[in-house]
Image (spheres, rainbow, N blue to C red):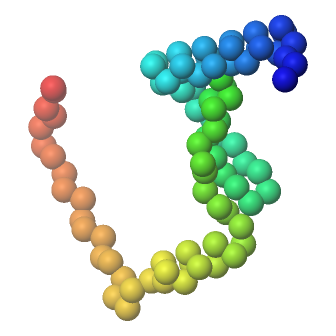
């Protein structure tokens, strides 16, 4: 198997960036593709498995999330006379 020095160096640097992100946390950004939504690290390119957002799965989610027979009632807001400082 023949590898080029530049390709090997690039792969090593990509791996080092991924390891550093793994230690300090990824800089994630929400990304969209045709039927998929996922998080991608801006620094190293790592991608999460993501979520399937195709029309097929959205229909199933809507059927599961149908409203209940009795809608939830909102509670009245309680006014506080004094402010507390932490």
Q: Nearer the viewer, residue 57 or 72?
A: 57
Q: Nearer the viewer, residue 76 or 30?
A: 30
Which quadrant would the N terminus be assigned to in this image? top right
Q: Residue 52: where, in percent of width, then height?
A: 65, 61
Q: Is residue 24 above or below residue 5?
A: below
Residue ID at (61%, 56%): 51
Residue ID at (39%, 86%): 68
Quarter assignment of residue 63: bottom right
Residue ID at (45%, 19%): 23
Q: Is residue 2 visible?
A: yes
- Residue at the extreme bottom: 69
Q: Nearer the viewer, residue 21 or 8?
A: 8
Quarter assignment of residue 82: top left
Q: Is residue 43 visible?
A: no
Please indicate whether residue 14 sits to the left or right of residue 79 in the image.
right
Please indicate whether residue 30 sits to the left or right of residue 26 in the image.
right
Q: Residue 35: where, in percent of width, then height?
A: 74, 60
Q: Residue 66: where, in percent of width, then height?
A: 49, 83
Q: Residue 9: where, in percent of width, then height?
A: 76, 9
Which quadrant would the C terminus be assigned to in this image? top left
């Amino acid at each position: 198997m023949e590898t080029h020095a530049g390709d090997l160096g690039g792969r090593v640097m990509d791996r080092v960036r991924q390891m550093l992100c793994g230690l300090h946390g990824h800089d994630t950004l929400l990304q969209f593709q045709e039927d998929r939504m996922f998080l991608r690290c801006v620094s190293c390119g790592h991608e999460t498995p993501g979520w399937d957002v195709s029309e097929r799965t959205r229909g199933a989610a809507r059927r599961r999330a149908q409203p209940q027979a009795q809608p939830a009632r909102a509670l009245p807001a309680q006014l506080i006379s004094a402010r507390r400082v932490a």
